[in-house]
Amino acid sequence: MGDTNPLPNSFEVKVDMPEKVKLVASALSKMKGVENAKFGQEVIEKLFSLTRMIRLFGLVLIIFLALAALFIISNTIRITVFARRKEIGIMKYVGATNWFIRWPFLIEGMILGFGGALISVILIVKIYGLLIQQVTESLTFLPLIPQYPFLTRISMFLLVTGTAIGALGSTISLRRFMKV
């Protein structure tokens, strides 16, 4: 057709960070020879708003579940201390130090926290594997985070955090309920 092409030239630009889309579109629209730069501003703003809401909800849920686990572990250790108060009294009479008495309860709290976190990790690995399988079959255009470097980091974080919550719950319970 020569110089009389009825279709306008177009370029598709991909941005590595979604937050930069608006900035890149405004910079491109100011370039010489560019009529307009379309980037679906309404859709992106709705997507960012939805992402913010999901993150906020997730953070509130994580805090709530961590406090619930802390409460459950603390009460479990408190019940164990009450059940063994005679043994604790005997240990004090024969000269056991406070830390010698507290260590088994602290370790029990850490094991409880680790066990809860391990159950969570197993469920997350199974559910995420099924989710990836379903999404890749039906929505091939939707990119997902690869399973193994992502899940390994999340699993380690959950196991360490669960153990720490167990130790904290045990410490709180021992401080409040164990009179040694």
Image (cartoon, rainbow, N blue to C red):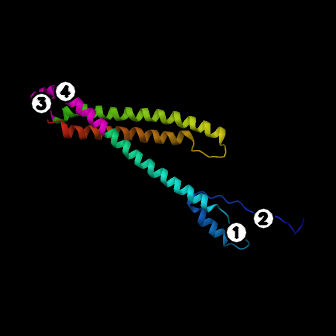
Position of residue 52 relative to residue 172, above or below, is: below
Q: Marks 3 and 1: which is nearer the front?
A: 1
> Which residue is painted at 60% across and 65% down in the image?
22
> Which residue is painted at 25% across and 39% down in the image?
171
Q: Amino acid at mark 1?
A: Asn
Q: Badge 3 is on which residue?
A: 92
Q: Residues within 10 Å of mark 2 (few under 14, many from 20)?
A: few
Q: Quadrant of residue 66?
A: top left
Q: Which one is earlier in the sequence, the residue at label 3 or at label 4?
A: 4
Residue 180, percent from left and from top:
14, 35
Q: Badge 2 is on which residue?
A: 9
Label 4: element kind: loop
Q: Amino acid at mark 3?
A: Lys
Q: Amino acid at mark 2?
A: Asn
> Which residue is painted at 89% across and 67% down in the image?
2
Farthest-out residue, right: 1
Q: Residues within 10 Å of mark 3 (few under 14, many from 20)?
A: some
Farthest-out residue, left: 93
Label 1: element kind: loop
Q: Residues within 10 Å of mark 4 (few under 14, many from 20)?
A: few
Q: Badge 4 is on which residue?
A: 84
Q: Which residues are magenta?
A: 71-97
Q: Which one is earlier in the sequence, the residue at label 4 or at label 2?
A: 2
Q: Badge 1 is on which residue?
A: 36
Residue 19, percent from left and from top:
56, 60
- The main secondary structure of the magenta stretch is helix
Residue 67, percent from left and from top:
33, 43
Q: CA distance from mark 4 to mark 2?
A: 81 Å
Label 3: element kind: helix
